[in-house]
Image (cartoon, rainbow, N blue to C red):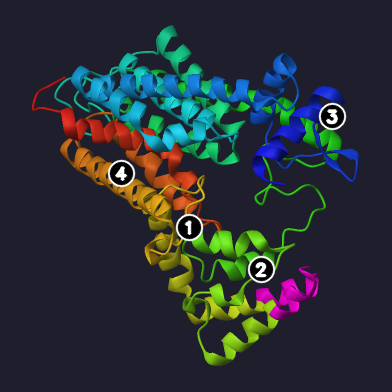
Amino acid sequence: MDDSRLYANIAENWITHGIYGVTDSGAVVPTLSRLPGYPAFLAAAFSVFGVGHFRPALFAQVLFDLCTCLLIADLTRRLISRRGANVAFLLAALCPFLANYAATALTETLEMFFTVLALDIAVWAQELGGLHAPRSTSIFGSLNAPPPGWASPRELFAWLACGLAVAGAVLLRPDGAILLGVLGLYVLASFAVRFQRARTSFVRLRPLLLLAMLCAGALLPLAPWTFRNWRTFHRFEPLAPRYANDSGEPVNPGFNRWVKTWIADYVSVEEIYWNVPGEAVPQGRLPSRAFDSVSQRQRTEALLADYNQDHDLTPELDASFAALASERIHASALRYYVWLPALRIADMWMRPRTELFAADPRWWEFNDDWQWLSLSVGFGCVNAFLVLLAARGAWQTRSIPGLGLLLAFVLCRSLFLGTLENPEPRYTLECYPVVLVLAASALARRRGDR
């Protein structure tokens, strides 16, 4: 069952049976494999327009996508200039990668909306706190501003609203919690120097109060979900399991660890990783980096042949993959912890974002139909142009207050994605609002233009 059908199944069971669960052998079984944000969105649409009617939900996602474009423009206006905001809106509205997922029943469109909403509110909150004073010389804000006083009600409300936007992102995908960590650290880093010069020790507690408002907005909406999981599964789970598995469902840790010793691109995810368990693994598709020696190649092929007999990854077979993974990690820890994560990050950022189409993921072999090949090459060029333009914009605007927040989010999310066994390009889409803001700044910013 793919993600879209799984979300729809949960939403349907939630509506018709009052159970947040999946259908298993005709019975509805409670689940914690997916956070409730997107199933709740589908359930709302199904309740009004009928179960299984995706089109109204997709129309709603188009509206969310339009709001995302407006938020990207507003974020650019606050950080760069009004002229940059116009360019950012145009780039966002014409961006094919954002539009693709607006027409797909997946979490990406709503996740991008709440992510850029949280970032925009955070920049607004910093303006209320006086960090965006003129002639700033730090990406963390104006360190030469006068010593601060106590927080205003508007500033407290802004950080609470920012936390609620983060909660929206977290309730859609567990990796939305990265945004909370980045914002929390940024609040402390931005205010720390200035508050050391505060007149009273009481005022020096202001960063902690702002952090508390942010965390309250982000964490309190998770309380019902956490309580439900504790009551239903007797398990403390405020997010969702690492491998999106239900309680008692095997996660194959040995096989997953072995995959991380060689996987570097999305092609291997489609051809190998997603096949296990349940489908055959084509051994001829394993890249040469999956083996360190002839004997290791023979052992690997024997394990895969054993799996291909019945397509079942038994605990014994999983343990054999774990032993093979340990051997490879011991042989080259740098490859496992540094080089392969770096390659996965690069692949997710620079690969043509055509995974929603029938295009051949091995586009570089140039043996696909010319229509799909043209699409892959075209999308790859568009993606590379925007990313390189964003890099230029980041350099040109390196002293702008608030830029540190955007760059820290992109960096932290990218580092996290490098730890995954399934480097899917869609996982970097949450960073694309930042890419569009910086790309717009490169196209529109002039010296002294605010």
Amino acid at circle 4 = Val
Q: In front: 350, or 36?
A: 350
Query: Is residue 185 within the magenta segment?
Result: no
Q: Left or right? Give the position of 42 relative to 357.
A: right
Residue 19 location (% of width, % of height) = 84, 29
| Figure check: 290 above or below 394 | below
Checking the image for residue 360, the label placed there is 1
Magenta residues, as a range? 305-322
Q: CA distance from mark 2 to mark 3?
A: 32 Å
Q: Earlier in the sequence, mark 2 or mark 3?
A: 3
Label 2–label 1 contact, CB within 8 A:
no
Identify which residue is drawn at 72% across, 43% down: 33
Q: Which residue is mark 4?
A: 382
User: For the residues carrying marks 3 and 1, which lies nearer the camera in this image?
Assistant: 1
Q: Left or right? Give the position of 206 relative to 57.
A: left
| Figure check: 81 above or below 234 | above
Helix, strand or loop status at disc 3: loop
